[in-house]
Image: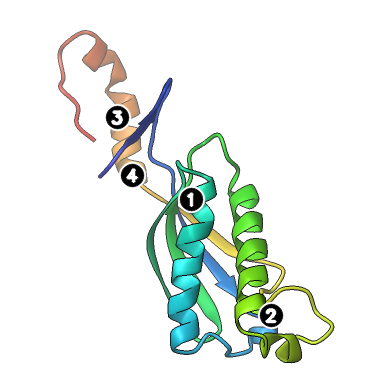
Amino acid sequence: MEYRKQAHITYRADYHLVFVTKYRRKVLKGGMREYLKECMKGIVRIFPEVEILEQNGGEEHVHQLISIPPKYSVAEIVKYLKGSSAYIMRRKFTFLDQVYYGADGIWSDGYFVSTVGVDEETIRRYIDRQGLEDGGQVRLEL
């Protein structure tokens, strides 16, 4: 388990994100999917603390495991990723203009997000033992 550090914060804020193509059209085939992976990695370079840890998906969706520091909202990063990637993909693969004629972007409006991290039992145990740790009686490890 890897914790990240910034000036006054230590955190682990990893999220599972899923984006679905508009109308669930199966447009992310072969090289397009690989290009999208590289595109997403390039987009997050604008946010140096945001890191895409894993990426994969199918012809109509993308899964990402992404680390987002607490100073950014998940919605802010998702909006930027979806908007920028749609713009880049439509410029690179012009046939998408016909597939999505009259529609903005390539992504459906919504997305799925779930937190990934320390399990609830570990957190409860950590909180429960805080008084003992402060007294030097217990050594805790997450």
Q: Which residue is mark 3?
A: 126
Q: Nearer the viewer, residue 123 or 117?
A: 117
SS class, disc 1: helix
Per the image, label 4 sits on a secondary structure element best described as loop
How are the residues colored? rainbow
**Which residue is tagged 2?**
22
- Residue 124 higher or lower than 1, as above or below: above
Q: Which x, y percent locates residue 7? A: 42, 22
For mark 3, give the secondary structure: helix
Kind of residue indicated by mark 2: Lys
Spatial CA span between label 2 and label 4: 33 Å
- Comparing marks 3 and 2, which lies closer to the viewer? 2
Q: Residue at x 47, y 76 (%)?
A: 35
Report the front residue among 34 and 60: 34
Residue at 50%, 67% (x, y): give it. Answer: 39
Q: Provide the residue designation for mark 1.
A: 45
Which kind of residue does numbered mark 4 sit on? Answer: Val
* Mark 1 or 3: the one toward you: 1
Dot 3 crowding, Cα within 10 Å, few <14, some 14–19, many 20+: some
**How far is mark 3 from mark 4, CA to CA?**
11 Å
Height in image: 78 above or below 119?
below
| Sequence-earlier tag: 1 or 3 | 1
Q: Is residue 138 above or below residue 93?
A: above
Whole-number angstrom distance, CA of label 1 to CA of label 3: 34 Å
Quarter the C terminus occupies: top left
Q: Which residue is mark 4?
A: 118
Percent position (x, y) of residue 15?
Answer: 46, 53
